Amino acid sequence: MNTLRLNQMGAACLVAAVAFGGSWVLGDVLVPHHAAAQTAVPMPQSTPDDGQDPPIETLLAHADVAKGRELADHQCGMCHSFAPHGPSVIGPDLFGVMGTHIGDIPGYEFSEALSARKKDVWTPALLSEWIKKPDAFAPGTKMAFPGVSSPVERANLVAFIGSLHDGDN
């Protein structure tokens, strides 16, 4: 191979690199990157556990099922169904879950972390604990959700989930 051919190949690589870099800079100037003003789906932020939450039974006495429904639609609805005999989406259907054994919904494969708790039953207190910080409730859970730090919001969610049942429950 002669030196003229090597020079041509080197020049072609240099021109391609300059064109790529220039287009990158030009693209950044024409379409600047701005962080989103708000996330598409607001996620609650976990806060350190101070252990001072009022008992869930006290909070449930004043819970708002409609607000719980709204929270569930925004924070849980992408992964869970709330319909009777609804499909498992990413997570299991939550209709009728209150009062059932943890990790025992037919047709859904639970993580080992939740399957290990099958002897426990979903009560308002356990459901609130789960919603507060899933990875603390069941370390190793598949549920990638940071939790809901507000005890009032958790009570609203628990009230809504508790309202999801057939008339005979």
Image: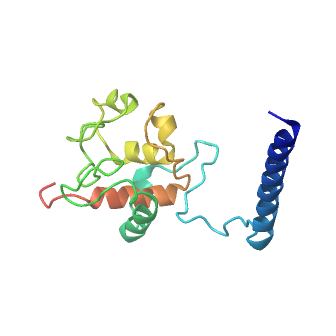
Classify residue 150 by image quadrant: bottom right
Classify residue 105 by image quadrant: top left
Q: Position of residue 106 (x, y in %)?
A: 20, 40
* 27 or 81: nearer the viewer: 27
Seen in the picture, residue 65 relative to 119 is either above or below; the reply is below
Q: Position of residue 123 (x, y in %)?
A: 32, 44
Quadrant of the rendering where the C terminus is positioned? bottom left
- Across the whole image, how many numbered discs are drawn on residues? 0
Residue 17 visible, this orientation: yes
**Please, which residue is most extreme toward the left here?**
168
Residue 62 visible, this orientation: no
Name which residue lies at 40% across and 30% down. 113
* 34 or 97: nearer the viewer: 34
Q: Position of residue 143 (x, y in %)?
A: 44, 42
Seen in the picture, residue 7 relative to 33 is either above or below; the reply is above
Seen in the picture, residue 26 relative to 115 is either above or below; the reply is below
Coloring applied to the structure: rainbow
Name which residue lies at 36% across and 67% down. 65
* 25 or 45: nearer the viewer: 25
**Please, which residue is most extreme toward the front here?**
2
* 151 or 131: nearer the viewer: 131
Name which residue lies at 16% across and 59% down. 166
Quadrant of the rendering where the N terminus is positioned? top right
Q: Position of residue 91 (x, y in %)?
A: 35, 47
Question: In screen coordinates, is 84 left or right of 114?
Answer: left
